Amino acid sequence: MSTRIGSASLRIGSALAALTLPALLTPHALAQSSRGLPSAAVIANADHFDPPKLTRYARRVAEQPDMSGTWTTMVPKDSGNGPTFDPVHTVYPPRLVSGEASFGPLPGTYIKGIPYNAEYQRKYRELIKETTEGKSRDTFAACIPYGVPRMIGDAPTPFDIIQSPDVMIWYNNYTRTERRIFLDGRKHPTEGSPVTGGNGPSYSGHSIGRWEGNTLVIDTVNMAGGYFDETPAPYSDQIHMVERVRLIAANILEDRMTFTDPVTMVRPWVVTRYFQRSTGPKSYLELNDRPCVPNVRIDANGFQVAILPAELDAAGGAGGSQGSGASANCPPQSATHPH
């Protein structure tokens, strides 16, 4: 299959939605359970056991800049309707008149300056034109997670950062996306395994990080092809993202992202976004593990098609996956290449 986002039909949703959970259940993954139970002596002594404290671990995290908490995307005051990945360089259509509402960007919205090659310049123009014709390729309503980088630059809701010395977790419950940034010195996987994260492209990819003074440098690869936002600006499964993340004020986070994509771009693309931390006592987002029931499906051409209530009822009554949301709500960590 091609590694491109779609030189013909951009069937991203169809490719990602076709992923199956059994790909995760390899013998290597299943062999991770520990055989045997605690001894009788260990159980008998449980009430007297003095557990080790997190003193040394806490000392390590205390040396890091505190990026933990809940963060909301900051946008220019003159931004138009709907989130886009790079609002500073977004061209917006005229604003809606009073009384009208739009959750996403208006048809015809686009980002200027993305260093696409000639093929993808043409493709992006075609995609923008499709939005003005009432067509949408957004897969989120079909229960496909946003993934990274869209969670960072396009999510309309806040996200959490949970911090530890060895791993940092970024989580957005609305977009059903979580990323783990490993700080323990590991490298990107070179062999396919669900345990190592090397079993093909995934929605969030594989992220490793290191501290350079007060700046967190994150390197992310192995992401499934998708769109940066709803305009919709595409990228391929060959994309590579390097971030330089730092606090520039007590509650303002800067994320300078550099993208390289040999399939779609002719040179690196740099986008800087800012985020505001919620003040007061830290409170984190609730876990969103409820079944996702799609209200659209993605057709063979990659477009949204509405699912009628009667179809949802019929699928649910028949035990179908659309009604339960089971298959859509459990994206695997491997992916076929979208084409």
Image: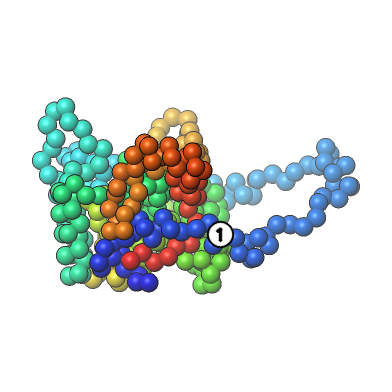
Side (left or right) of 28 relative to 2: right
**Nearest the camera: 164 or 269?**
269
Side (left or right) of 145 relative to 324: left
Name the image quarter holding the C terminus: bottom left
User: Dividing the picture into quarters, in which one does residue 235 lie?
Assistant: bottom left
Circle 1 crowding by C-alpha within 10 Å: few under 14, some 14–19, many from 20: few
Residue drawn at x 85%, y 47% is 42
Residue 63: x percent and y percent?
52, 50
Residue drawn at x 33%, y 52% is 298
Residue 142: x percent and y percent?
37, 47
Residue drawn at x 21%, y 32% is 101
User: Dividing the picture into quarters, in which one does residue 256 lie?
Assistant: bottom left
What amino acid is found at the position of numbered circle 1 in the picture?
Pro
Residue 295: x percent and y percent?
36, 41
Residue 1: x percent and y percent?
37, 72
* Residue under label 1: 22
